[in-house]
Amino acid sequence: MTLLAIDEGRQRLHLVDTADARAGWQRDLGDFPLARDLQRLGRDRALVGFERGFIEIDIASGAVLRTCDRWSGVTAARRLPDGRTLVTGMNLDGGTEGINVVTLDSDLREIESVRRDGDYVRGMRPAGDGYLLCTNDHILETDAMLRPLRKLVAPGFEHAWKAERLPGGDTLVSAGYGAFMARFDAEGVLVHTFGGAAEVPEAVAPFFYATFQVLDDGRIVVANWQDHGPDNGAKGRQLLVFGADGALLDTWSDAERISSLQGILVL
């Protein structure tokens, strides 16, 4: 498996081949702190969201091709099919405490900004005409103006990291410190959790389920972040692969290179 991987513990971005530890590259993220979000932009380019905005990189080399650096408090960035970019975070408008989603045109000019009261947000993904916002102990689904439509809640959500609407209408969520995955049906009803400590081998050491990706074949790849700092690589298995039914199929780690795997983008 080849992937881009954010090592939060050492503030590095890697291109990883899980079958060959000698392959790929790594780059320091000191100039782009608190990188959290990853998105593929065509064959050769990827978007990397960080605390002040986002960069676009060349996948083959890690070279930075474009930079948008203008805020403080960004937690998610997402390029839309029409070329617009959504930037989400806390207090991005410089006003009172709240959650913002800012829309940029293809030239990175701000064309819209919406806001709602709130004191926490991590991942954001579009859902229909609105958004899925990870707001700590629940997922808030909103309309385009950030007005609430419903909440998705599972016992144990704590700093829930990412929510994604699946093609069939279900929503998949990584529970953060809850260290499990949760699936909700199209009506917002919790139907399944998986990946918790009681369901995986002890060596996995679930600590914080962060970014995940659903592959075309239905497998679900999850980053099992293991805490802040540079020396966490041997605490648990860093990358987990589940079947569509939630059964653990495979794990991977590279404790020498990576401390705390947080963001992933399977290529």
Image: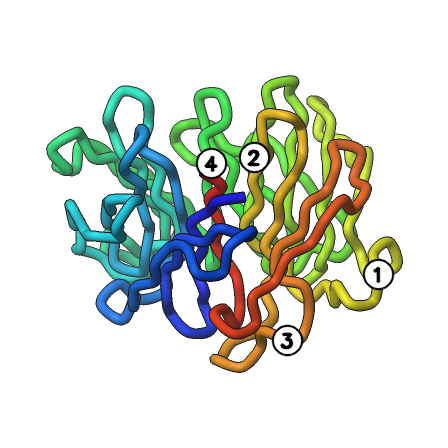
Q: What x and y, as percent, mark residue 135?
A: 55, 51
**Identity, as a three-letter code, of the amino acid under mark 1:** Pro
Structural crowding at the residue carrying mark 3, measured as other residues with C-alpha within 10 Å and reported as few (<14), some (14–19) or many (≥20): some
Q: Secondary structure at mark 4?
A: strand
Mark 3 vs mark 1, CA separation in Å: 15 Å
Mark 1 vs mark 2, CA separation in Å: 26 Å
Q: How many marks?
A: 4
* Residue at the spot 46% in from the left edge and 44% down from the top edge: 265
* Residue at the spot 64% in from the left edge and 48% down from the top edge: 174
Sequence-wise first label, 3 or 2: 2
Sequence-wise first label, 2 or 4: 4
Sequence-wise first label, 1 or 2: 2
Q: Secondary structure at mark 3?
A: loop
Structural crowding at the residue carrying mark 1, measured as other residues with C-alpha within 10 Å and reported as few (<14), some (14–19) or many (≥20): few
Residue under numbered circle 2: 164
Mark seen at residue 234: 3
Q: Is residue 63 in sight in this rendering?
A: yes
Q: Secondary structure at mark 1?
A: loop
Mark seen at residue 125: 4
Is there a contact, CB below 8 Å, between mark 4 and mark 1? no
Residue under numbered circle 1: 201
Mark 3 vs mark 4, CA separation in Å: 31 Å
Sequence-wise first label, 3 or 4: 4
**Identity, as a three-letter code, of the amino acid under mark 3:** Ala
* Residue at the spot 72% in from the left edge and 49% down from the top edge: 250
